[in-house]
Amino acid sequence: MKSKKSLLSIIFCLSFFCLIFNSCKKNKDEESDPESTFDKSGMLTNIGQNIIIPQYENLKLSIDSLQIVCADFISNPTPTTLTIFQSKFADSYKTYQWVSTFEFGPAEIDILRANFNTFPCDTNDINNNIATGLYDLSTVSNIDAKGFPALDFLLYGSNQNNNYTLSLYTTAANATNAKNYLTDLVNELKNKITTVYNAWIPSGGDYLNTFKTNTGSDVGGSIGMLVNQLNFDFEILKNARIGIPLGKRTLGIPLPDKVEAYYSQQSIALVLEHIQNIENIYLGRSKQNIDGLGLDDYLNHVNARYGSGTLDDAIKTRLTSAKTKLSVIPGPLSQAVLNNATIVDQAYAELQQLLILLKVDMPSSLGVLITYQDNDGD
């Protein structure tokens, strides 16, 4: 009986020591794993609270103003009201560049990117919609007949002549239909951005709470979604905004009419806004230059290396170089791809190098799987 009790005591002691050992080992492993000790929730809180929501709010306010000047133009189409409308449109289009990356959660539900900025627009569909007065902007068939690209066409026309543009809303046979179409386009922009913004804020759908607490790097995790969409959006910049007009998909034959904002000739301005937003997200920096936890901090925390230096330094260097080479492209881009192709190609090559760091090296260091498909070949 005594030996049985002794045996039980020995088993208990061994179990106790094993439990303590495993617990200590686990704590030690966690301490030696920098990935597990990074403040992921803090990073997501900063990006969601100080970058995403304020930028959605800025776009909402800008489109609210766009709706007002649109109504003023519709009620009194004059050279002055048209110029004001064009100016506010350009401002809103630039502001949109600061939210195009966030195509997850509420924006993914409303397909914000496709509805707001499918370019080039289909001018035949736009003209047909105006001529007949029969259209449904919610259908897939009209995805390239609305949003900012459609407004770009309708406010500037193909000849950059404001007198001609004004006639479309005053003396043209379909002037009333054209004014109605303008109104419907702007109203849809307002309705969609209001829905997405309200879904994010704590007093609305509070997607912010979901975003900052879902700290996973896997599919469906906030870090996984953020890194995937940052890369997807960057590929749009590299390919759709620069590569396709330059002729990278057409055996070197330029396609100048494929640029973003073809009619207002604001392509370079929009590209520079876009890449600045990409950089700010990476740095965890607000538009007001308030620096918080970002992907750069995460990479440094896990000691991500690139060659003899840090991956963070490599990305920052490429970002600076890409911005510089984009900024020296003489506008408009539609002319630059024809007359200054070498300069545009240098910017494209820099974007290509930066994409490798963002799409291959960064996800690998953070344990993120790139899940979207492309046929670019990088």
Image (cartoon, helix red, strand yellow):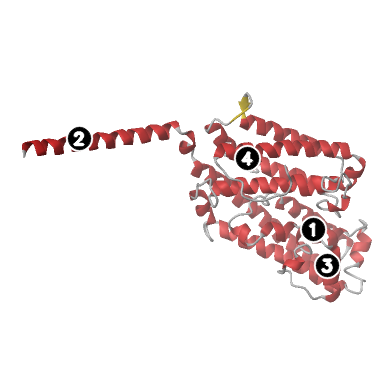
Residue at 90% across / 70% down in the picture?
170
Circle 2 crowding by C-alpha within 10 Å: few under 14, some 14–19, many from 20: few
Label 2: element kind:
helix
Which residue corresponds to mark 3?
125
Asked if the residues shown at circle 2 and circle 3 are in contact, with their CB atoms under 8 angstroms apart, the answer is no
Circle 4 sits in a helix, a strand or a loop, which is it? helix
Is any atom of residue 291 visible in this view? no
Q: Which residue is mark 2?
A: 13
Closer to viewer: mark 3 or mark 4: 3
| SS assignment at label 1 | helix
Of callouts 2 and 4, the N-terminal one: 2
Callout 4 crowding tier (Cα within 10 Å): few <14, some 14–19, many ≥20: many
Q: Nearer the viewer, mark 1 or mark 3?
A: 3
- Nearest the viewer among 20 and 276 is 20
Q: Image height check: is 321 above or below 97?
A: above
163 or 208: nearer the viewer: 208
The amino acid on which the numbered mark 2 sits, given as a three-letter code, is: Cys
Q: Give me the C-alpha separation between circle 3 and circle 4.
A: 38 Å
Which residue matches tag 4? 282
Mark 1, other Cα within 10 Å: few <14 / some 14–19 / many ≥20:
many
Relative to 70, is 7 above or below?
A: above
Q: Amino acid at mark 4?
A: Tyr
Sequence-wise first label, 2 or 3: 2
Counting residues from the start of the chain, the first of labels 4 and 1 encountered is 1
User: Dot 1 corresponds to which residue?
Assistant: 149
Residue at coordinates 71% horizontally, 33% vertically from top-left?
318
**Point 92% across, 41% down: residue:** 339
The mark that comes first in sequence, 2 or 1, is: 2
Contact (Cβ within 8 Å) of mark 2 with mark 4: no
